[in-house]
Image (spheres, rainbow, N blue to C red):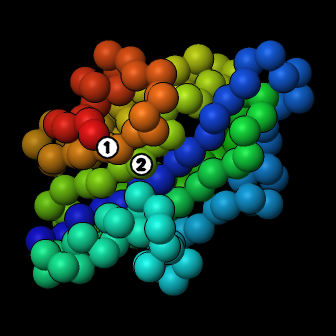
Amino acid sequence: MRVGIIGLSHESNTFIQSPTTFEEFRRNLLLVGEEVRQEYGDAHHEVGGFLQGLSEANFEAVPILLAGAMPSGRVTEDALTKIMEIVHRGLDEAGELDGLLLAPHGAAVSVPHPDMDGYWLEEVRNRVGGGLPIVCTIDPHANLTQRMIDACNATV
C-alpha cells in the first residue's frame, strides 16, 4: 500500500491587513517530498503521526508537501497558486497511490478563496478522482465546511 501525505496549514486572521505571502511559507515551513520525512519522521505532529502509523502498518508513505505559515492575514492568490503547483506536481510524480492522508488546519482563508481548506482539498480530490480514499485531519477548533467534508472520505 502506498499512501501520499500532504499538509497545508494556515490559521488566517481576516482582521489583519498584512497578507500571508509565499515567502512567509518559505520562511516558516515549506518541505517537499523526502524533506517531509527527514524533518517530521519522528515529530510530535500529525504528519509525524501519519509517517509513524504508516510505517507501523508496513505501508509506504509517499510524502508530497508540508507547508505552513505563522497565523496572520489572508493567504495571497500568488502563494496559494505556487503551493498548489507543488501539490499537483507532487501528485503527478508520486506514481500510483492507494490513498491520501491530508492535514489542513481548517482555518485558512485566501484572497480568492474564503474557504481555502475546502478549495485545496477539493482540488486534490479533483486531481486524483473519486475512487482514491482520502482521510484528512483538522484542528479541533477548525472552521469545518461542507466543501471540506465532501472532498474527503473521512475527516478526523
Reply above or below: 85 against 113.
Answer: below
* Total numbered labels placed on residues in the image: 2
Residue 43 point in image, percent of width and height: 49, 73
Task: Please tell me which residue is depicted at 44% across the width and 78% down the height of the picture.
Answer: 41
> Which of the 4 image quarters holds residue 18?
top right
On the picture, is 126 further left or further right than 75?
A: left
Q: Position of residue 61 (x, y in %)?
A: 29, 73
What is the number of the mark on residue 90? none
Identified at 47% across, 68% down, the residue is 44
- Residue nearer the viewer, 56 or 114: 56
Mark 1 neighbour class, 10 Å CA radius: few under 14, some 14 to 19, many 20 or more:
many
Q: Quadrant of the N terminus?
A: bottom left
Residue type, mark 1 in image: Cys
Q: Earlier in the sequence, mark 2 or mark 1?
A: 2
**As drawn, is 106 to the left or to the right of 2?**
right
Q: Which mark is residue 103?
A: 2
Q: Secondary structure at mark 1?
A: strand
What amino acid is labelled 2 in the image?
A: Ala
Q: Which residue is mark 1?
A: 136
**Quarter of image, res 9:** top right
Residue at point 28%, 30% (across, down): 151
Q: Provide the secondary structure element on which disc 2 rests.
A: strand
User: Badge 2, how many Cα within 10 Å: few under 14, some, many 20+?
Assistant: many
